[in-house]
């Protein structure tokens, strides 16, 4: 398995409330996750898989496989986040219908996402649950905490301090408002289409 860093159109845009400097620093963190995921996969490939050497308190395979989830989360979360920055507007079609059906209205969804983001230590996601066929705003404290099986994230909102402190200081809510205003709903729709959600 080999990951490469991707380029994102949001880095060529002038974003309201998220500076180029903050975005460029943020990209370095994303690149770090890509490098670490590749390093971990290399180490796993060369690891002695003898079960007698595995241990749930400490063992090489445990450390590598646990930290791999942080590296992969760091890649996936940031790629969704960077892909969706810049655009604004409102959702349309079935996506808008489902947000209205599951949250009451677009404004109610925004309020829920903002509260979820303020309460989160790292991530807030809008995700589609394939089992219940519903959208929900989920909370995550780390790159790899609280994922729910059979859910596909449609929006990833980074609320780690590194995402906003340079531009907003401790005003996390101000940053969240700025993020929500700039969600590229076409990118969200494209993601839903790519995975066959809302067909
Ligand atoms: Fe981040």
Image (cartoon, rainbow, N blue to C red):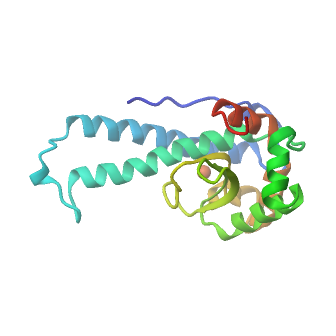
Percent of width and height locating residue 99: 81, 52
Q: Nearer the viewer, residue 164 or 63?
A: 63
| Quadrant where the image shows the C terminus | top right
The residue depicted at 78 percent of the width and 52 percent of the height is 179
> Which residue is most to the left?
52
Q: Is residue 119 left or right of residue 174?
A: left
Inspect this view and state whether residue 182 appears: no
Q: In which quarter of the image is residue 197?
A: top right
Q: In this view, does 64 lie to the left or right of 143?
A: left
Q: Nearer the viewer, residue 137 or 166?
A: 137
The residue depicted at 85 percent of the width and 46 percent of the height is 96
Percent of width and height locating residue 88: 87, 42
> Which residue is most to the front?
132
The residue depicted at 62 percent of the width and 45 percent of the height is 25
Q: How many marks?
A: 0
The residue depicted at 14 percent of the width and 41 percent of the height is 48
Percent of width and height locating residue 178: 83, 54
| Quadrant where the image shows the N terminus | top left
């Amino acid at each position: 398995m080999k990951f490469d860093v991707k380029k994102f159109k949001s880095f060529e845009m002038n974003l309201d409330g998220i500076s180029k400097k903050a975005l460029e620093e943020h990209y370095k963190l994303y690149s770090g996750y890509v490098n670490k995921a590749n390093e971990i996969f290399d180490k796993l490939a060369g690891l002695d898989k003898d079960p007698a050497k595995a241990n749930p308190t400490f063992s090489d395979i445990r450390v590598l496989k646990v930290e791999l989830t942080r590296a992969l989360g760091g890649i996936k979360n940031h790629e969704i986040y960077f892909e969706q920055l810049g655009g604004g507007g409102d959702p349309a079609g079935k996506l808008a219908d489902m947000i209205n059906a599951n949250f009451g209205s677009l404004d109610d969804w925004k309020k829920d996402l903002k509260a979820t983001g303020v309460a989160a230590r790292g991530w807030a996601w809008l995700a589609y649950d394939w089992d219940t066929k519903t959208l929900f705003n989920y909370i995550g404290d780390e790159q790899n905490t609280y994922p729910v099986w059979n859910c596909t994230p449609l929006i990833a909102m980074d609320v780690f301090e590194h995402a906003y402190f340079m531009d907003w200081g401790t005003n996390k809510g101000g940053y969240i408002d700025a993020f929500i205003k700039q969600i590229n709903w076409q990118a969200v729709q494209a993601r839903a289409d790519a995975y066959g959600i809302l067909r």
